[in-house]
Every structure is written in structure tokens, then in C-alpha cells.
Image: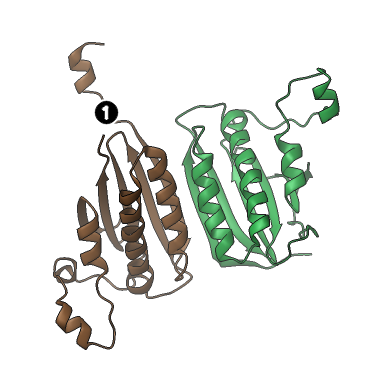
Amino acid sequence: MTYPTNPITSMELILPNELGYELIARDAVAAFAWRLGVPIDRIDDLKTALCEACINAIEHGNSLKPDLHVEILCRVEDECLVIEVCDEGVRPFAPKAEPLSIVEKLAGMGSLRGMGLMLISQLCDESGFVSRDDVGNCFRLAFQRHRAASLGCSSNPGSHVSV
Amino acid sequence: MDKHDDTSREPVEKIIELRLPSKLGYERVAMDTASSLARRMGFHDDRVESLKTAVSEAVTNAIEHGNQQDSAMKVVVLLTARDDELIISVADQGRKILDQDDTTSSPHIADVLEKFDKGGWGIWLIRELMDEVEFTTAPSGGNQVRMVIHLEQ
């Protein structure tokens, strides 16, 4: 099953691989989402989730290398705003078999950091790594455009690792 | 590092590239992106407002005139942040090439008020608000406006 993508309603943003630029991405994509009719409370969720995804790309995927870039692709798929955050894959994403829960982290069983993917999964209607032809990690976030409730987005065809 | 090394050093710059649909309304995305970067660089609020207006006019011109509102076309905005300035380049795909005379002439207010269409102030506004403005041809062959705003320390 495929879902229509409107090539006209798409935006691309390429950022320097430097912490702090996730805030520029946040403001750019929030303006794009507002234009597409995404409710304001969902835009707040989007801003937090996008920042987390960008920080992951900068810190982990691109290993903080200043000569690399993070690419953000935004488009409308069916009734969802889909955002892909792609890095250049210095470090490929390797999912942990059993990530620690917040309770376990608070109990000192691991670093207090590393909750970005869990946070993103709570804020988006759908999220996860997707395969791409180029080298690099690509993380997909999807938000319903016209409903405040998180009812879920139709998933993109192809490989998709939910978090 | 000696003094010679310091003065011969290449300016540090960071580039953000934004590709937008050629559809009126999406100039807001360019405005918000540029203002977010300008605030991060330390520009004062009044300069940020000037920048937003100039970017809005430049992107609107690219959508309306350069790309003739063909929503399948793109507008490319390049934001180059340097230590002492922000350079904004707005390029269209050149469905209609801008007449160079239109980039230098100033509208006469009396003439404009008599016309039904009160537009035509965009380029004049950009020149008033930005520190440097240059109209060139984009690598794609379209129209390109390069605007510079200096950061006062």
C-alpha cells in the first residue's frame, strides 16, 4: 500500500553539524508545520522531538565533526507532516536490545542521558529509523496535520524501525 | 599563532541552505529561519525585524515574479553566518528574468498611489533595510539577490 506524497509541499534544510543549530531547524520546521495547519500543541511536541533528533544526528551520527552536515526533509504524506533527519553516518545507529527505563536510570543503573529516542516516541504520532540509499542514518518523525490527538500516521513503505 | 597567521586566516562561516516551495505563504518559513539565526548571532531586535522584512520581500519576489507562482518550482535561500555579518542569498529558477532597470529604480509614491496595484516597493525596501544588496544570476540560471547585514559589536 502506498500513500500519496505531494512534491509541491516539501521543504529541505541543510545545517552545519554543530550543536545549537538544532534551534534553527526547530524554528524553520515549526513555521513550515504552522503553514500546513498542524495544531499549536502538536507544534510544541514537534519542536522538542525535532531538537532531540537533530542533537542525535549531530552528536552520534556525525560524531560532532564540524565539516559534516545534517539534512532535514519535510513533506506531506497523506494527512501527515513527515520529517526526516539525516546525518552522514560516521556512526551507524545500533539499537540496544533492552534500553534502560527511566526508573532504572534514576536508580543509577546507567547514564541519565540517552532518553532522546524514548522522548521522541512519546511526542510523535510515529517515529523510527528508515533505510536510505545514501550512507548515513535517517530518522523519520510523523505528525497528524489536522488532529490534536495522537491517532498515528500511515507508515511510509519500506524499512522502518520503530522506537 | 603570530599576527600574520591571525590576519591571513579565512573567515569562519557557517552555511544553512533552505529549499522552499514556490508558493506564497512559505516566505514565512524563510523569515523565521533567518530571524532565528540572526538572534543566535547577536543581532539587535530592530535589525532582526529589518532582516525579516527584507527576506520576506526577496522570497515573495522570487515566488511571484522569478518563478511566476509555479508551485512545482523551488526558492533556494542560503544563509551564511560570519563573525561580523550575515549574508542572505535568495534564488529562483528564472521563469521570468528580472530587468536590471527594475533593481535600481525607486518607485515614486505619487505614481504608485494612483495605480490600482500598490505593489512594487520590494526592491526599494530591501535596499533601504540591508547594508549591501546585489542582484545577480543564480548558478541555476535564475534570478538571485544577495543581501548582507553587518553585525555591530
Q: Residues within 10 Å of mark 1 (few under 14, many from 20)?
A: few
Image location (x, y in percent) of residue B16 = 42, 45
- Chain letter, disc 1 residue: B
Residue holding disc 1: B10
Query: In this view of the protein, which residue sits in the foreground, B104 or A23?
Result: A23
Is the residue A16 above or below the residue A145 in the image? above
Number of labels in the image equals 1
Residue A118 coordinates in the image, percent (x, y): 76, 38
Q: Is residue A131 above or below residue B101?
A: above
SS class of the residue under badge 1? loop
Q: x, y (%) of residue A68?
A: 48, 33
Any idea which chain is the green one in this picture? A
Residue appearing at x 17%, y 68% in the figure: B100
State the residue at coordinates (34%, 57%): B90
* Res A43 → quadrant: bottom right
The colour chain B appears in is brown
